[in-house]
Image (tube, grey):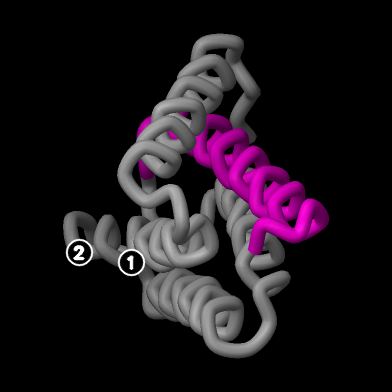
Amino acid sequence: MFSFSKDAILFGVAVMLAFLVALHLIFPHYPLQVAAGALMLIGLVYPILLLGHHHSAQQQRDEVLAALVTYGLAVVGLAIWPWAVPIGLAAHAVWDFIKHNTGRGAKVVSWYPPMCIVVDLLAAAYVIVLLLAGWI
């Protein structure tokens, strides 16, 4: 089980703030597309990390399935239903919490899961605000 250190949380907030600034400066008219693209990349992190270490077939299946769900929600969000993007971001945060509390899947440094959870949840909240405000 991991703990939510203050440093990991602050790093997650800093990453999210940097992402939001870049989003508004570089792609001000495409927030859903950028968020969906980020979700696709987020979903690939753990399967890519699997390549560096030996993991069981079950752990590999878990990571690939989670990546496919995450990627699928990003595509659905772009093509059909924008709400799938924040749902995908929140689902990835839940996956981080579950996998790292059970020890399943790709291994990462201890600060990464809480940082990723913070980024995922803040990104989901941001997209929800944009959807509710009618900006997406």
What number is the disc on residue 51? 2
The N terminus, quarter of image: top right
Q: Which stretch appears magenta? A: 108-136
Q: Indicate whether residue 4 is drawn in magenta.
A: no
Q: Indicate whether residue 125 is drawn in magenta.
A: yes
- Residue at coordinates 45% horizontally, 70% vertically from top-left? 63
* Most frequent secondary structure within the magenta stretch: helix
Is the C-beta separation of discs 1 and 2 under 8 Å? yes
**Residue 69, image x and y in percent?**
55, 79
Q: Label 2 amino acid?
A: Leu
The C terminus, quarter of image: bottom right
**Residue 3, image x and y in percent?**
64, 24
Q: Residue furthest top?
A: 6
What number is the disc on residue 47? 1
Q: Label 1 amino acid?
A: Pro
- Residue at coordinates 69% horizontally, 52% vertically from top-left? 130
Viewer-nearest residue: 22 or 65: 22
**Residue 81, image x and y in percent?**
68, 82
Q: Give the secondary structure at mark 1.
A: helix
Which quarter of the figure has residue 92? bottom right
- Residue at coordinates 58% horizontally, 20% vertically from top-left? 9
What number is the disc on residue 19? none
Can residue 105 be spotted in the picture? no
Can residue 49 be spotted in the picture? yes
